[in-house]
Amino acid sequence: MRWTSFLQSPAGLVLRAALTLGLLGWLATRVDWVALGGLSVLDWRLVVPAVLLAGLAYPLQILRWQVLLRAQDFTLPAGRVHAASWSGFFYNSFLPGGIAGDAVRFNLLRQHAPDRKTAAATGLLADRLAGLAALFGLAALALARHLLSHEVGRDGRLLLAVSGGGFALFVLGAGLLPLTKLWEPAATRLLGGPRAQVLIAAVQPLTRPTVALPCWLLSVAVWLADFAALWLLARAVGLETGFWGLSAASAGAYVVASLPISIGGHGLREGTLVALLSVLGIGSGQAPAVALLAVGFFALSVGWSLVGGAVALLDSKPKSAAG
């Protein structure tokens, strides 16, 4: 049985749920809840803007998808696009697999244009890849900046090499996409001539500079909003850390959380954050603050995902094919 098939099986789902709950439980035991009584330890002047900044990342993601939709000539009401996106954020956070939200968005496009499934899937994949490319690029930048001013061991330098290499692969792939003559023969062999031409027609609008550049800038803005929110939260719990080091750790946490081995990345994301902070020499002697930051990291993600759940409930009535 392949590993991916096992993860989707009942036993795999139980294992992923156990991993999620186990990691979150471990983090909870590291927080001094007695000292935290009444959340008085938090600086709410920093918590509030952290929450708002974390929320800003979501409409920026929706705007990125709208750029791709316009490039592919999908004409949908903005309200339908926002409703599907917010619903997707909720399903991605609470359902196994990590792609349930993409299924919601794909279904919207399928209802709107049932004969353009390839274009719909291509746009969604481009949306995902744009976010990952920006994440790897910012991770490399943040790690390089942190390493300039901090003594970090071999593991830190290895992380820099991995993030830089990952970003280089994304850049290479993005550079090859417009050169359809290079990959058209392979696509034709794999998909057949007619399907390959449909794929090429779906990809070409997404490679235009007027589309790729805004998507890249929006992706960078999404992650910077997330990183800034976590940095403010770190200051709110009393954790002494610089912006770049924390950004590097959170970028790595998001990359690991994208692996389908826990429910919505929960637990895995927070546990990875704690581990990477240690690798980068951040939070030494401040274990309770680090654990509290990780718990806050979880709360930010779940809290805004629940907003998506409310949107999904309000948007549950049937819609016409025209949206």
Image (cartoon, grey):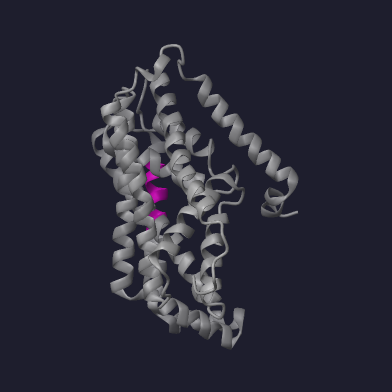
Dividing the picture into quadrants, the one containing residue 229 is top left
Measured as percent of width and height from the top left, residue 85 is found at 46, 57
Considering the whole magenta stretch, tell me its main secondary structure.
helix
Measured as percent of width and height from the top left, residue 87 is found at 50, 53
Q: Is residue 25 above or below residue 109?
A: above
Dividing the picture into quadrants, the one containing residue 193 is bottom right
Does residue 128 appear left or right of residue 8 in this picture? left
Question: Residue 315 or 246: which is nearer the viewer?
Answer: 315
Question: Residue 184 or 31: which is nearer the viewer?
Answer: 31
Residue 217 magenta-drawn? no
Q: Is residue 267 above or below residue 316?
A: above
Image point (64%, 38%), residue name: 17
How many marks the image carries: the answer is 0
Image point (28%, 39%), residue name: 244
**Residue 128 visible in the shown view:** yes
- In the picture as drawn, the residue positioned furthest to the left comes out as 149
Question: Residue 43 or 221: which is nearer the viewer?
Answer: 43
Q: Is residue 89 above or below residue 155?
A: below
Question: Residue 179 or 247: which is nearer the viewer?
Answer: 247
Image point (47%, 81%), residue name: 200
Residue 163 magenta-drawn? yes
Dividing the picture into quadrants, the one containing residue 285 is top left
Image point (42%, 71%), residue name: 76
- Quarter occupied by the N terminus: bottom right
Measured as percent of width and height from the top left, residue 312 is found at 52, 52
**Residue 246 visible in the shown view:** no
Q: Which stretch did the figure color magenta?
A: 157-167
Does residue 102 appear left or right of residue 137 in this picture? right
